[in-house]
Image (cartoon, rainbow, N blue to C red):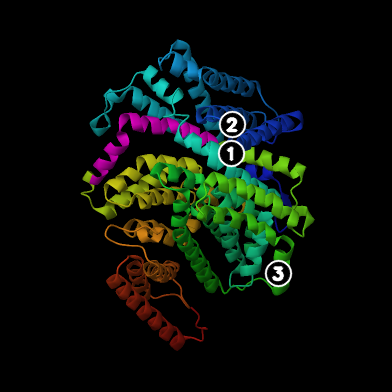
Amino acid sequence: MTKSTSGHTVQPADLDKEAGGGMRLLEGPYKKAAAIIAVLFSAFAIYSNGLSNIQEIYRNLIFLGILLVMTFFYYPAAKSSNQKRFTLFDYLFAALAIAGLGYLLLNYTTIHVDRGSQPIMIDYVFGAITIIVLLEASRRAVGIFIPILCGGAIVYALFGTYFPWIFGHAGFSLERLLYRLYMTTEGVLGLTLSTASTFIVMFVLFGAFLSVSGATQLFNDLALAIAGRKRGGPAQVAVISSALTGSLSGSAVANVATTGAFTIPLMKSIGLKPKFAGAVEAAASTGGMIMPPIMGAAAFIMAGFLGISYTTVILAAIIPSFFYYIALIFAIDIEAKKLGLKGISKENIPDVFQILKERGVLLIPIIVVITTLLMGKTALFAGFAGIGAVIAASWLAKDKSSRITISKTIEAFIEGGRGTIQVGIACAAIGIIICVVTMTGIGSTLAYNIVELTGGQLWLILIVVMLTCIVLSMGLPSTALYIVVAVTAAPALIEAGVHPIAAHFFVFWFGALSNITPPVALASYTAAGLAGANAMQTSWEALRISLPGFIIPFMIAYNPIILLQAAEGETVSIVSVALVVVTSTLGIYALASSLGNYLNAKLTIVERILMFAGALMLIKPGMITDIAGLGLCVFAILFHIIRVKKNSSVEITI
């Protein structure tokens, strides 16, 4: 729970409503029944991942079965449906989910051992039921786009002979498709669901335990203490607070709803316009999706797709996420200088030492998670260690309200179960798309033809893929959007010679930025609602202040050393990494100044062009471009300072 500046406590149910998640506000026995299922779900996740040797296929079946039941109980069929209790349709779909997955649970060995993987009609019937139920669950929890994509994939698999040009293929029978989707680990019960039933659910539970311990409030207080007195302080607080919260939640919309209730009124109180306050929160919260260690749960799936360790992925994300947030801080500072804003008065700033004294131990679990990962332990081990550390740290905190009691453990289990619904359902549904892409080979076909149609020009391929990723990701949660762009767009970049990790970061990054890119900018719209601002204006404002962040994926594609990965013929060294960080940071500052059209006063057109050109040169890797870019920026800044000093009494600050 978090508190807004008005003192109102924001309950989880409020967050669902604000975030537009569509989750029911259940009452009475229905609320208790759903909570019991959520607790059982979380308990099963802990048991199956840490206390038993259950076979993967059976773990996934039970996991998905409970998840589907939770979905139908927590998410109504439509806005007009009863929001306080379950309906007949909810019971019907829950029963069908149990029947479909329960049948396979009981007969999996029979199908594959006794019958030698030769299905019979009843197998196909239950398979069809399960697919239909899953599509309905994804429509309720994730939105209409995923079921449409899945439905399109099924049609494409069945009727491939009727598709023109490069899209045509021999086609598959309904029986063969159902077998692959339902009865093997290549479809719904495949890699993505396995990732959800292990790493993702454990880290969602870790975040839930942190939340009930009061860590979110600790993040807000620390951010306020660190940045509150600086120029445009509350906006800087929003960036830091959202970065800290987003590093664990990874959901841009949930991050806005959680931290925005506190930061947006604070920003408005010092004179920032509502649309700018909302834009800052939306942009900062979107950055949480690419912030390690969670990365919106995409880090776990990315590691699986690339066949690398989870630790490699989160280490690769450190420098890019630093660039993104430093770009936001620069953009906000420039806006604050324009408006002549000051920070918050000293008496309204919490004492950082007092904060750390009372609840500082709640930072220990995060350190434990990062340390265990750097030691080479698995993400699953890190998740368990993190949960244990939260419980222990909560009892060491001086603030007794932080202690995790039995009631708070139950609350964490409920929130962990609820928090897994969207990402888990998305992972299961996307298994349909992955299966069809694998069966038809359309992924590699598209990759080859994109490279051919663009003449192999990398800059053009990057632009085409960028636009594709933004469009395909609109309205999707982080895990779903990553999987969609990873199987459709990333192969084109790898085919063009981009480092595989860089290719996956590129597509995920632009997928994440769809949260603030009009017309479907969910994070911006959520922030606009909290700020009392126009949704579309807030979205465009968020896009404007985040523009330097749109350059970062191109930097990654051209220079994988930013991800701590060596390009062909090169090696990663401390000097090379430091040089890239310094020159790119200078370039990002110059770019933010150019786009913001301000330094110590409004820039002239010549100054702005020089700063923009110099920024792009600094951002592009290479000694010659770095020297040329630095020269252009220094010349533009000196020219600007001399001009401003000559014409006015403006205080010169950089």
Q: What stretch is highlighted in magenta?
A: 423-451
Residue bearing the label numbered 2: 67
* Sooner in the amino-acid sequence: mark 1 or mark 3: 3
Asked if residue 2 can be seen in this view, the reply is: no
Q: How crowded is mark 1: few (under 14 residues within 10 Å), some or many (20 or more)?
A: many
Q: What secondary structure prevails in the magenta region?
A: helix
Rendered position, 312 above or below 358 = above
Residue 269 lies in what quarter of the image?
bottom right
The answer to whether the residue labelled 1 contacts the one labelled 2, judged by CB atoms less than 8 Å apart, is yes
Horizontal arrangement in the rendering, residue 547 relative to residue 254 (left or right): left
- Residue shown at 66% from the left, 68% from the top: 225
Q: Is mark 2 on a helix, strand or loop?
A: helix
- Asked which secondary structure carries label 3, the reply is helix
- Identity, as a three-letter code, of the amino acid under mark 2: Leu
Q: Earlier in the sequence, mark 1 or mark 2?
A: 2
Front-most of residues 304 and 641: 304
Residue lying at 69% horizontally and 59% vertically, measured from the top left: 361
| Lower position in the chain sequence, tag 3 or tag 2 | 2
Q: Which amino acid does label 3 sit on?
A: Phe
Does 627 appear above or below 81? below
**For residue 292: magenta?**
no
Q: Residue at x 65, y 60 (%)?
A: 220
Which residue has dot 1 on it?
Answer: 420
- x then y, percent, for residue 631: 33, 78
Task: Name the amino acid type tagged 1.
Answer: Thr
Near mark 3 (Cα within 10 A), the count class, few <14, some 14-19 or many ≥20, is few
Q: In which quarter of the image is residue 277?
A: bottom right
Secondary structure of residue under mark 1: helix
User: Which residue does the numbered mark 3 point to in the structure image?
Assistant: 353
- Residue closest to the eye, 556 or 538: 556
- Residue 311 is situated, as x and y percent measured from the top left of the image, at 47, 52
